[in-house]
Image: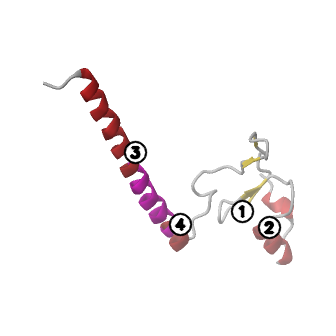
């Protein structure tokens, strides 16, 4: 029969093995997801991610989107440089107010 200490050692070893396997599997999953995103041209907006950014202080700053491209689902909060999709629409003669949410 195993002692308590032996069982604790086995648990620690199994946890370490499980973590190593989890990291390997996670890397494979991430690579697969990235490949699929690239292959299908999926955007962050289509996945439901918001335009959140992390500042140097580590705080998250969110700006509610004010403009949306209904074809791609991409959004822009009106802060910073205009995104490429909006610049392209404006270059084609459209007004940014057409995309206001």
Cβ atoms at labels 1 and 2 below 8 Å apart: yes
Q: Which residue lies furthest to the left in this view?
A: 1
Main SS of the magenta segment? helix
Residue designated by label 2: 86
Snapshot quadrant of residue 11 = top left
Q: Which sits earlier in the primary sequence, circle 4 or circle 1?
A: 4
From the image, state whether disc 4 or disc 2 is nearer to you. 4
Across and down, in percent, residue 46 comes to 59, 58
Give 28 or 23, whichever is nearer the viewer.
23
From the image, state whether disc 3 or disc 2 is nearer to you. 3
Q: How crowded is mark 4: few (under 14 residues within 10 Å), some or many (20 or more)?
A: some
- Residue 37's disc number: 4
Q: Residues within 10 Å of mark 3 (few under 14, many from 20)?
A: few
The residue range painted magenta reads 22-35
Q: Which sits earlier in the primary sequence, circle 3 or circle 2?
A: 3
- Say which residue appears at 65% left-offset and 64% top-offset: 72
């Amino acid at each position: 029969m195993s002692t308590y200490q032996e069982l604790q050692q086995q648990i620690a070893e199994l946890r370490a093995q499980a973590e190593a396997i989890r990291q390997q599997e996670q890397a494979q999953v991430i690579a697969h997801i990235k490949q699929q995103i690239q292959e299908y041209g999926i955007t962050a907006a289509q996945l439901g991610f918001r335009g959140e950014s992390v500042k140097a202080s580590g705080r998250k700053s969110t700006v509610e989107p004010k403009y949306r491209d209904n074809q791609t689902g991409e959004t822009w909060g009106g802060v910073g440089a205009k995104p490429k999709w909006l610049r392209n629409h404006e270059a084609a003669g459209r007004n940014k107010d057409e995309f206001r949410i």
